[in-house]
Image (cartoon, rainbow, N blue to C red):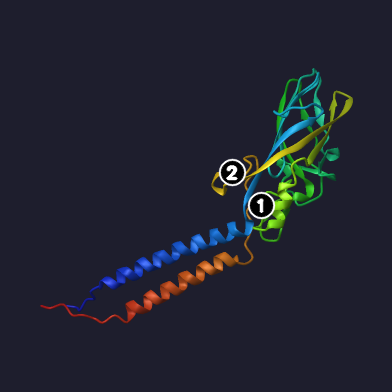
Amino acid sequence: MRPTRTIPPIVFRVIALLLAALLLAGCASTSKLQSTLGHKFKYSYSMTDPAQSADMLYRDDQLIIQFRVDDPGLRFQVQNITSDPMSIDWAKATITVRGVSSAVRTGRTLYDTTKTPPAAQTIPSLGVLRESVVPLGNSYFDGSQWRIDDLLPTTDANTHTMRSTISSLPGSMIEFRLPVTFGSEPRWYMFAFRADSVKQVSWNDYRPASWIPPHPPVKALRPSPESQFTAVIIASSFLGFLRYIMTMNKVPVVE
């Protein structure tokens, strides 16, 4: 009979160590990313103009609109309650954060790499539109992935300076200028929102804005440092285990 190899208990211990190394590599990568971002913070907002509203709801004789302020931008639902079509001229819309104004991108054009403004949208009589806006420069491709900056800083990078900055931001204003036309009658709306308070939240409880569409697929030009670190651990552990198996003593079967 052919000689066979018996697998001593130490092999199973090596396998267990290999699995542990893989697990620790994944945990190290996640911990490194979170430690880079630091603590997470969340702001509470209210509408201050054209009317005070904790629910961020506004109504006049032409429209009903309600907002939500998320980390990266504004989400809103608007209904045209006139008998005429309502048109939004996105090329003239602006969003102002702490006094700095910018053109906007909408949820439909979030990953547009040009400076072309979003096309106008028309809402029929009694129609409803759900849309979102971010400052034009806050959505960009950094060469390896898409990034969407927050309206106000929400992570402290583990620095006292940034934590102090974030704690000083309640009272900051965000303004949204919305140009619309009802039939042939143009009208400008200016909505203003105040950050009333800020608090630290757990990363486990954090959920990204649900209206952010999935990032377009991109071709990775080079592996990230985290991926390289994980690959080194996997390769080293596997080679060590393979070397051990290849040098095991052959034990013949006793007949």
**Looking at the image, do the residues carrying marks 1 and 2 touch, with CB atoms under 8 Å apart?**
no
In the figure, is residue 91 to the left or right of 204? right
Which secondary structure lies at badge 1? loop
Seen at 35% across and 71% down, the residue is: 14
**Disc 1 to disc 2, how far (Cα)?**
14 Å
Q: Which residue is mark 2?
A: 207
Seen at 79% across and 19% down, the residue is: 82
CA neighbours of label 1 inside 10 A, class few (<14), some (14 to 19), many (20+)? many
Which secondary structure lies at badge 2? loop
The numbered mark at residue 42 is: none
Along the line of sight, the residue nearer the viewer: 87 or 236: 236
Q: Quadrant of the C terminus?
A: bottom left
Seen at 85% across and 27% down, the residue is: 181
Q: Is residue 248 at all visible to an observer of this figure?
A: yes
Q: Quadrant of the N terminus?
A: bottom left
Q: Is residue 119 at all visible to an observer of this figure?
A: no
Specify the amino acid type for callout 2: Arg
* First-in-chain label (1 vs 2): 1
